[in-house]
Image (cartoon, rainbow, N blue to C red):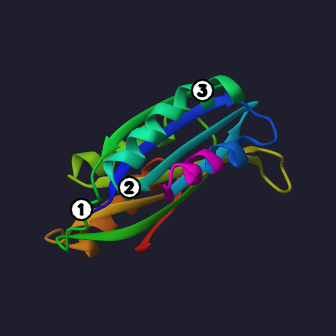
Amino acid sequence: MSKFLVISALGQDQPGIVDELSRVILDCQCNIVDSRMSVLGGEFAVILLVSAPDDESLATLKARLPQLEDSIGLTIIARETTARDTSPDRVPYDISAVAIDHPGIVHQIARFFSSQGINIESLSTDRYAAAHTGAPMFAMHMQISVPADIKIAELRGRFLEFCDNLNIDASLTTG
């Protein structure tokens, strides 16, 4: 049975970071199962879910992380985890939202879903200039996990009304 490790790392962006991280993981007989990587400002941020075939491989990888941290100038945090529970009583949905950028959009939408008992599985945002006006625009994409007993038509209606009141153009579609 596989062992799992979540690794997050942050450091100044430079060529070769992904190469070094993936090489060490492979050298320890481990595998990258899932990942998110991005350059944010001048910093490179990564979060990885790594599987190990056994305790020895996992321990070897954990032992190598401090020297990797020093060699490529990253701050690395690692935490053991379990395989993800893919419970059939939750249904995936995608959310997209666009609005003129202003503080609090992520918080307002996150609060809406948390008040409904809905888990946010992933979230990404971007800021860009509107095509003709140059106005600062905000775009968000998230995946949520909706309990199967929630009536999706009612949820969609409440969510779209909520967004209309905040002048956010949004959609809720099946994942």
The magenta stretch spans residue 156: no
Question: Which residue is at a point 27% across and 65% down the rendered structure image?
Answer: 155
Q: Of tags 3 and 2, which is closer to the observer?
A: 3
Q: Determine which residue is flagged by label 2.
A: 121
Inspect the image, locate mark 1, and give the three-letter code of the amino acid beneath it: Asp
Task: Return the x and y of residue 93 as percentages of the image width and height.
Answer: 38, 69
Task: Return the x and y of residue 11 as percentages of the image width and height.
Answer: 67, 28
Highlighted magenta segment, given as a residue range: 23-33
Residue 85 is marked as 1
Q: Going from the N terminus, do you reach mark 3 or mark 2 first?
A: 3
Q: Quadrant of residue 132?
A: bottom right
- Front residue of 41/50: it is 50
Q: Is residue 54 above or below residue 63?
A: below
For the residues marked 2 and 1, what is the alpha-carbon distance in whole angstroms?
12 Å
**At numbered mark 2, what does the secondary structure look like: helix, strand or loop?**
strand
Q: How crowded is mark 3: few (under 14 residues within 10 Å), some or many (20 or more)?
A: few
Question: Which residue is at a point 72% across and 41% down the rendered structure image?
Answer: 17
For the residues marked 3 and 1, what is the alpha-carbon distance in whole angstroms?
33 Å
Q: Determine which residue is flagged by label 3.
A: 67
Q: In this view, does 69 lie above or below 114?
A: above
**At numbered mark 3, what does the secondary structure look like: helix, strand or loop?**
helix
Inspect the image, locate mark 2, and give the three-letter code of the amino acid beneath it: Glu
